[in-house]
Image (cartoon, rainbow, N blue to C red):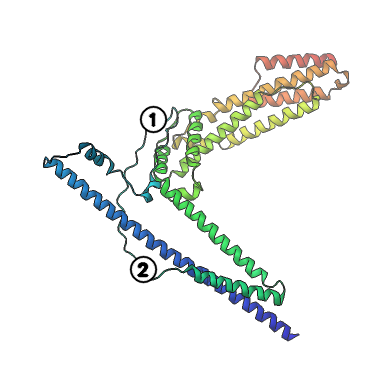
Amino acid sequence: MPSGDDDDGATLRTELEASLLKIHSLEKENQELKQETSRLKAQINTLKAHDLERKSILWKKLHHSMDCGKVIDDPPQKQKLQVDVPIKKSTSDQTNVINPPPSPPQLLQRRVTAPPPPPPPILPTPVGSKAVRRVPAVMEFYRSLMKRDTQLKETKNGASGLAPAAYSRDMIGEIENRSTYLTSIKSDVEKYGPLLNYLIREVQSAAFREISEVEAFVKWVDGELSCLVDERAVLKHFPQWPERKADALREAAFSYRDLKNLESEVLGFENGLKQPVIQSLRKMQALQDRLESSISGVERSREGTSKRYKELQIPWQWLMDTGVVGKIKLSSLNLARECMRRIAKELECNEASRDGDLLIQGVRFAFRVHQFAGGFDTETMHAFEELKEIGSRCG
């Protein structure tokens, strides 16, 4: 019995050593990849510097020849050189060139022109980088040996070798996926740098008079940022991004949009006569519940929200009862009218409904809306008088 435990322990130790070797090999390979990447970046930067220096010399010679009055045999070719040399970029720089995004309609009229990037610094080439090269065949052979060793252990000990192998594959896949994600983030930072700097200036200087303008502006900004693989991760590389103001603009725009959508739903509510009266009442009550809950949330945080919006130059008057919130409250009168008219019609046409309970539900709902909206308008008051008269006759 102890010998069996010793065999299991030896097997586990062997598997652990194999896993550690794999991890060590992956770490070594990762380090080699980093060194190779650094070397290639250094070579690219060196080539860029030489290219810029050569362009500068050509540019100086061109100006010198023009100042000395030299005769140029081919003026069109010279004119072409004068235009193309300053803006010509190497292939590696083309991903950084982005046309400025269109300005939001009726809000921003400025255009941005990104300044030409400064010449990159000349980085020294790592010592010994030309002598050390990665040999993929070595890694492939090592992996094949490890795979064969794992298969032999599986044959001897059943499925005991599956867990380390599966774990290794999962670990390699996770490392590759993480590396791809980080590479995409870095690529977006370099590629969309001019765009993000432009948006930073626009958000910082944004000031509006109407909340509808904020909604349009936020929609435009979100459309421009939709090209990023991960907005939050990319914007972390831009410490000047006005996150507090951008979040407040989005909050205001989304709150306003949700309230307007709810208002449209309330105003567009139609009482279907084919539906049972109880079902119609439940729908109206549910809609009123949503309306009261949304307005109550706005009113609870209205003082702090309006103060913050004032500070960030965001419209805040719409939060008051004299603004959009007050208009949305009045939209609930449409539900009260539909409710009272449906109950009045039901009481006139159906004698079985004249037990008083339906009338009480209608009056209770009308009173609820009356308190929420702050009163009735003429049309709603007329509907209430009709319900009251019919209720008196039925009683």
Q: Residue furthest right?
A: 352
Residue 207 pos. (x, y %): 42, 33
Q: Up-down: is 27 above or below 317? A: below
Specify which label sits upstream in the sequence, 2 or 1: 1
Residue 361 pos. (x, y %): 78, 25
Residue that badge 2 annotates: 130
> Of 73 and 17, which appears nearest the observer?
73
In this rendering, position of residue 4 left or right of residue 73? right
Q: Residue furthest front?
A: 73
Q: Residues within 10 Å of mark 1 (few under 14, many from 20)?
A: few
> Of 81 and 194, which appears nearest the observer?
81
| Location of residue 390 (image quadrant) | top right
Report, in whole angstroms, how far the alpha carbon at label 2 lies from the one at label 1: 53 Å
Q: Residue 109: which disc?
A: 1
**Quarter that holds the C terminus:** top right
Q: Residue furthest left?
A: 68
At 45% from the left and 64% from the top, the residue drawn is: 33
Q: Up-down: is 213 above or below 98? A: above
| Location of residue 298 (image quadrant) | top right
